[in-house]
Amino acid sequence: MNEGEEKMKTARFMIATALFALVPATPGFAQTNDDQAAAGAQEDEAAEDEAIIVTGTFLDDGSKSAMKMDVPVLDTPFSVSSYSNEFVKSLETQSVADLYNYMTGLKKSGGTAYDITLRGFKSSGDDRNSIMVDGLPGLTGRYGSPPTIGVERIELVKGPMSVLYGQIQPGGFVNIITKKPQAQAATTIELRGNTWLSKNRHAFDHFGLTGSIDSTGALAGDGALMYRLVAQYGDNDGFRDFANQKQTFVAPSLTWEIGPDTTLTVQGEYRRTREKFDNGLAAPFDGLTSVTSTIYDIDAVAPITTTYQSPDDFRVEEGKALSAYFKHDFGNWALNVSGRHVDYSSHQQEFSSVNVARIAGEFRVTRRARELKTDRKYDYVDINLNGEFETFGLEHKLLVGVNAGKDQVSENRLKFFNSNNRNAAGVCPVGGTCLDIGLYNPDFGAFPSFESLPALNPALTDQENLLTHRVIDSSNWGIYLSDLITVTDWLKVSASVRKFREKAVVQPDARNTPTVVNTRITKRDVLPSFGILLQPKDNITIYGSYAESFVPADPGIYDINGQNNFAPLEGKQYEFGIKTEDLLDGRLNATAAIYRIDQIGQITQFQCPLGSCSAQIGKARSEGFEIEGNYEPIDNWQFIFGYTHINARVLTSIPSQAFQVGRPLANVAKDAANLWTRYDWENGLGVGLGVTYTGPRAGILPTNKDDLKPLDLPGYLLVDAGIYYKAERFSVNLKLGNLFDKRYFESSGAGSSGRVQIQAGQPRYATLTTRFTF
């Protein structure tokens, strides 16, 4: 660590220590009921202090994401959850991904922001539609999860929704609803400090500090022009060796109420992250030499703080976005136009993990030196018209729209230095360079520096094709129509249809002259979904639905021969469920559902000489049951709870992969549950307690018939707790995560590379947040 970095860390330590010292110094005065009422009347709902006494439920009763209309959850024939701002504030997390354990059916499943598992199916790290922003695809960061400071609420839509959105995985998607300008002036300044409190990381060994501001109000006297500025800077150490992340986030926005029926909102976003590159942990095998068995042992991994990437390995990513949302009401009809442009770039240098080998009686992680520059541009627009009318005594809520988009991805490999292999005695060949490192005692001083290595290893043959500059241009458009028909007071029918076309043009290596171009066109005339809703009472809905998804295979993947001849991934879901609201005198809302999803064209990944290769294995099925609810037994005390049971497995496969049939899909727990509760006293003091359980999972789907035990991840139970205090314009919150310091693993990577991309969960930590509102 150089002198400047040492001074910065010392400064962060002093500030974080002072921040934690504020806890006993916090004044203990209480607000009167009149004071609280006055404060509540003055603060705008969307810009109120982040630690306000809970006044709303954790689950909202409305969600626009599922049907692109303002339709109550009870009138939606699919499972959809709208997690309110109160939910986000109560859990006191810094990134959206930290909320997933308390969102039923959703789990983090990899090292990128897009890596999630929902209803048994995993999205990939390049799936821009798995997490949307205000209904449009394209995050400003591929790896780091979006910060919660800019989030108003989160909508989770489960099941295939391609009919309205296009390329959607069969499990569903996450939609982040961002904070928008408000007329009532309010500003909140936040300072957050965190440290690890684990047997692996002691207090202030690794720590962090984050500062934020959220300001909104009117720019014109009549309130027709409003602004909002959300900004954050964080410098945080991770719990793993050398781990550090510096992130800047700025999101300005303007709303212009052009007239009583017309609104335009323009929103910008800038995010820059510099972090230590880290593949994760690696699992050794049992050493059996039999051709019928290879067992990878998760219990034998190194301590969770261990890293195999050098201290100077890094990734820098920068993203800029510009979004616009226009709405005009025509009485019973409304026109909505939304668009989003994202410009993203990243640069990374790392000694990436490749595999685990036993060399001279010692387990070692084989590595390669890689440098990659990536540029991505996304442009998407959605235009729809929705309205209400009657025909022959039937009430219609009709939606008709068109969406289109294009994106370009440029991936330029500047270095791809493969390591030489050591002999049985552990000796590197003469003239060769070996980059493997000890599994349990990595010694980073025994290797040449990254900068000293050439782009390719001159001691190896057939390396010249490994440096590529791949460019992918994709475009798509679709027309959709949806109608929610009220037949009687107790019967509703929903029907939707989509026609679309997708095109992808791939240049495997843009440096070649003439450039080789592969073009793939995918289209479909009819993509349907429909549902039936029975409503015996105003607050109960019994529903059944059918929906399909259609996702062209990622044009950027290739098989072991370097070809991309993969068929589209098609999904079909059947779902039945019941939804209730305002039971027990308005204190209980709940949803229960059973479903079956079949996906044809499942793709798995594995390590190959080209880096990472893919294979299309056949048909996978996920079927399960889930229940979720929000319960408030007394005023100011509420629970959010959920349970899901999933049986996700391979049904059919190609002959060479027949051993996969019957195997569970990777990173999918059969059982998972969550419970979060919070109680607030009238004097401003509050407490929260949460428990989450994730069952055992298969870490990877085997790609070799000799994989007897491909990598089993054990189940885990976590406990979180929080203490909150709020005065009129000041609040302080203490969050303790993983209270009992449970060692656990969130997920592993895709395919066989998952054995060297195991993501360890966070050990025990403390976060102290202070906020000032004026």
Image: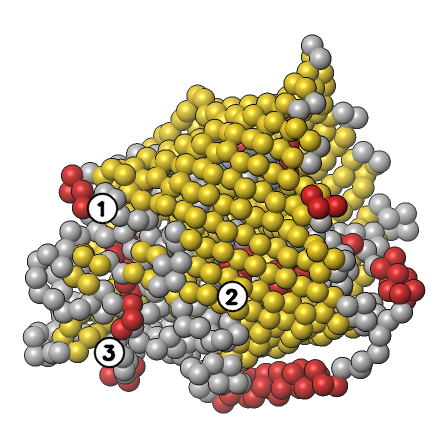
State the residue at coordinates (90%, 47%): 222
Considering only vertical position in the picture, is 272 above or below 549? below
Identify which residue is drawn at 8% across, 65% down.
Answer: 289
- Disc 3 versus disc 2: nearer the observer: 3
How far across and down, in percent of the image, does residue 28 sit? 80, 80
Q: Which mark is residue 660?
A: 1
Query: Is the C-beta separation of discs 2 and 1 under 8 Å?
Result: no
Q: Which residue is mark 2?
A: 273
Q: Secondary structure at mark 3?
A: strand
Please tell me which of labels 3 and 2 falls first in the chain.
2
Local SS, label 1:
helix
Q: Residue furthest front?
A: 584
Query: Is residue 58 in view?
Result: yes
Badge 2 element? strand
In whole angstroms, how far apart are the C-alphas of marks 1 and 3? 31 Å
As rendered, which of 591 and 248 lies closer to the eye? 591
Residue at horizontal 61%, vertical 67%? 689
Counting from the top left corner in percent of width and height, residue 593 is at: 51, 39
Identity of the amino acid at label 1?
Gln
Pick the quarter of the image with the C terminus: bottom right
Quote the CA–CA distance across marks 3 and 2.
Answer: 29 Å
Q: Is residue 380 left or right of residue 450?
A: right
Give yes or no for contact between labels 1 and 3 (Cβ–Cβ under 8 Å).
no
Mark 2 vs mark 1, CA separation in Å: 39 Å
Name the residue located 65 percent from the left edge and 18 percent from the top edge: 487
- Between label 1 and label 3, give the one nearer the viewer: 1
Q: Visible in this render: residue 519?
A: no
- Which residue carries the number 3 mark? 438
Q: Toward which corner of the image does residue 371 lie, by quadrant?
A: bottom left
Residue type indicated by callout 2: Thr
